[in-house]
Amino acid sequence: MKKLFVGSLPFTTKEEELKDFFSQVGTVESAAIIIDKMTGRSKGFGFVEMSSDEEAQKAVDTLNGTDLGGRNIVVNIARPKEDRPSGGFGGGGYRN
């Protein structure tokens, strides 16, 4: 199973619509749109899991740059999530 990053989504896109759109190139295992915790609105990107590496590559080749809801979407193979430092507000400021 291969995960795809999907960017430049219209903010009105629903997960079911995303799943249907990607199903034209293969079997979609899951589709998720990332929602902003503060506003409850879409952040304009999401992830789709295809059932095989071949279908994932076909989705990138076929759907990257195509129109979905009036926007040209970006489709890439998702990179593994990087560890980010947690907590606090980063460095900087004055130290005595």
Image (cartoon, rainbow, N blue to C red):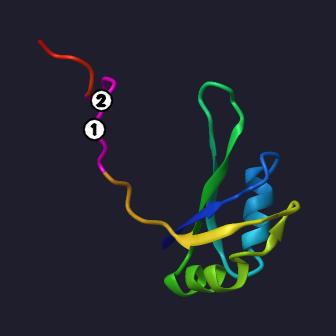
Q: Quadrant of residue 43?
A: top right
Which residue is farthest top?
96
Residue on which the image places disc 2: 90
Which segment did they paint magenta?
Answer: 83-91
* Residue at the image position 27 percent from the left and 20 percent from the top: 93
Q: Main secondary structure of the magenta part?
A: loop
Residue nearest the observer in this picture, 45 or 59: 45
**Horizontal side, residue 86 vs residue 20: left or right:** left
- Magenta residue check for 87: yes
Residue 32 visible? The answer is no
Label annotation for residue 6: none
Q: Residues within 10 Å of mark 2 (few under 14, many from 20)?
A: few
The percent position of residue 32, horizontal first and vertical second, equals 63, 52
Q: Residue 92 in the image: x percent, y percent?
A: 26, 26
Residue at the spot x=22%, y=17% of the render? 94
Q: Which kind of residue does numbered mark 2 sit on?
A: Gly
Which image quarter is the C terminus in?
top left
